[in-house]
C-alpha cells in the first residue's frame, strides 16, 4: 500500500532487552499475524480423514447387522418348517396306530397251534395220476404234485376227499378220454358220489352220460372227448367224495386234463 492513499501504517513498538521502546519503520509489514498456508491444509486434511473413517465403520456395522439379521430369519424359518414336519409325522403315526386294531380284528393269537386250520376254509384240488394198469372205475389222484393241494382239514386218501365240516360245498370234476378204437354203441359215464358213515351204499351226487360219441368208420383215428361236472351240494362231516368213470383205460395221460376238487362256500 502506498502512502498517497492517506492511511498511515500503524506504529509498532519494539522493546529490546534494555527496556527502551523502539519504533518500527513504517515500510515494514509484520508476517507472524497468520499461520503458514501448509499447516492449515494439513489440519483440514486431518479433519476429513477422521470423518471418512467413521463413516466407513458405520457402513460396515450396518452390513454386519443385515447379514446377522438374514441368518437369524433363515434359522427361524428352518425351525418353523421342522416343527410343522414333526407335527405332521405325529398325526400320521397316530392315524396308523388307530387303524391297526381294525386289521387285527378276528385274528387268532400267534400261539394258537390250530390257527392255520381255523383261518383257512376247507378246500382241495387234486390232479390226475398216470397209471399203466387200471383195475377199478374209481379214480386215483395226485394230492401234492403241481397245483394240487388240500387245506382246511380236508383229507385225501385212496382217491377220496374227506370233509371235516358240515356245510355247502362246490364240487367239480373233469376228465378227458382219448382212444383210437370205439364203436357207435359205446357210452361214456362220468359221475361223482359220496360215502357216508353208517350208510352201506354210495350216493351219486352228479353224473354225465354221453352216448353215440363215436361215429362209424372212426376206427384208426385218435379222438378225444371231455366231460365236466360241477355243482353246489350239502355235505356232512366225515363224508368221503369220489369220482367214477366207465372207461378208466381211455383217460388222457395229461395231468391237467383230469382233475377233481371241492371247497366250502
Image: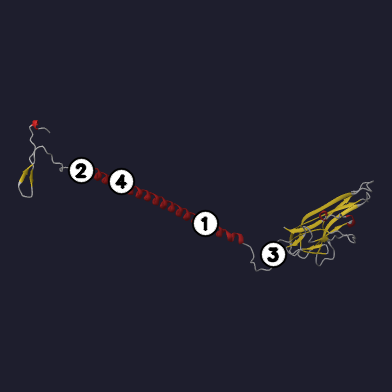
- The residue carrying mark 1 is 89
Q: Quadrant of the C terminus?
A: bottom right
Give the distance between the C-alpha atoms of the residues marked 2 and 1, in whole angstroms: 81 Å
Residue 225 vs residue 234, the one in the foreground: 225
For the point 31% across and 48% down, the residue is 53
Left or right: residue 149 compared with residue 14 = right
Give the distance between the C-alpha atoms of the residues marked 2 and 4, in whole angstroms: 25 Å
Q: Position of residue 14 (x, y in %)?
A: 8, 45
Q: Quadrant of the N terminus?
A: top left
Give residue 36's mark: 2
Q: Which of pointers 2 and 4 lies earlier in the amino acid sequence?
A: 2
Q: Which of pointers 2 and 3 lies earlier in the amino acid sequence?
A: 2
Q: Residues within 10 Å of mark 1 (few under 14, many from 20)?
A: few
Contact? badges 2 and 1 (CB < 8 Å)? no
SS of the residue under disc 2: loop
Q: Position of residue 115 (x, y in %)?
A: 68, 66
Q: Which of pointers 1 and 4 lies earlier in the amino acid sequence?
A: 4
Please identify, in this view, whether the residue under mark 2 or under mark 1 is nearer the observer: 2
Left or right: residue 133 compared with residue 142 = right
Give the distance between the C-alpha atoms of the residues marked 3 and 1, in whole angstroms: 36 Å
- The residue carrying mark 4 is 52
- The residue carrying mark 3 is 116
SS of the residue under disc 3: helix
SS of the residue under disc 1: helix
Q: Which of pointers 3 and 4 lies earlier in the amino acid sequence?
A: 4
Amino acid at each position: 500500500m502506498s502512502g498517497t492513499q492517506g492511511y498511515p501504517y500503524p506504529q509498532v513498538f519494539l522493546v529490546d532487552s534494555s527496556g527502551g521502546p523502539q519504533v518500527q519503520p513504517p515500510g515494514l509489514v509484520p508476517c507472524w499475524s497468520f499461520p503458514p498456508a501448509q499447516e492449515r491444509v494439513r489440519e483440514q486434511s486431518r479433519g476429513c480423514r477422521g470423518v471418512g473413517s467413521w463413516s466407513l465403520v458405520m457402513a460396515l456395522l450396518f452390513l454386519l447387522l443385515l447379514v446377522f439379521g438374514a441368518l437369524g430369519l433363515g434359522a427361524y424359518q428352518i425351525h418353523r418348517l421342522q416343527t410343522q414336519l414333526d407335527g405332521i409325522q405325529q398325526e400320521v403315526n397316530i392315524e396308523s396306530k388307530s387303524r391297526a386294531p381294525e386289521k387285527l380284528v378276528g385274528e387268532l393269537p400267534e400261539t394258537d397251534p390250530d390257527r392255520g386250520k381255523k383261518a383257512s376254509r376247507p378246500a382241495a384240488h387234486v390232479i390226475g395220476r398216470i397209471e399203466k394198469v387200471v383195475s377199478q372205475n374209481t379214480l386215483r389222484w395226485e394230492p401234492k404234485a403241481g397245483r394240487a393241494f388240500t387245506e382246511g382239514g380236508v383229507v385225501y386218501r385212496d382217491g377220496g376227499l374227506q370233509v371235516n365240516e358240515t356245510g355247502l360245498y362246490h364240487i367239480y370234476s373233469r376228465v378227458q378220454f382219448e382212444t383210437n378204437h370205439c364203436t357207435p354203441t359205446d357210452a361214456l359215464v362220468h359221475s361223482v358220489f359220496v360215502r357216508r358213515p353208517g350208510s352201506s351204499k354210495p350216493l351219486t351226487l352228479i353224473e354225465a352220460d354221453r352216448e353215440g360219441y363215436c361215429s362209424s368208420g372212426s376206427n384208426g383215428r385218435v379222438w378225444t372227448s371231455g366231460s365236466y361236472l360241477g355243482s353246489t351240494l350239502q355235505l356232512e362231516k366225515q363224508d368221503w367224495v369220489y369220482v367214477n368213470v366207465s372207461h378208466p383205460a381211455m383217460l388222457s395221460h395229461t395231468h391237467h386234463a383230469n382233475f377233481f376238487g371241492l371247497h366250502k362256500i
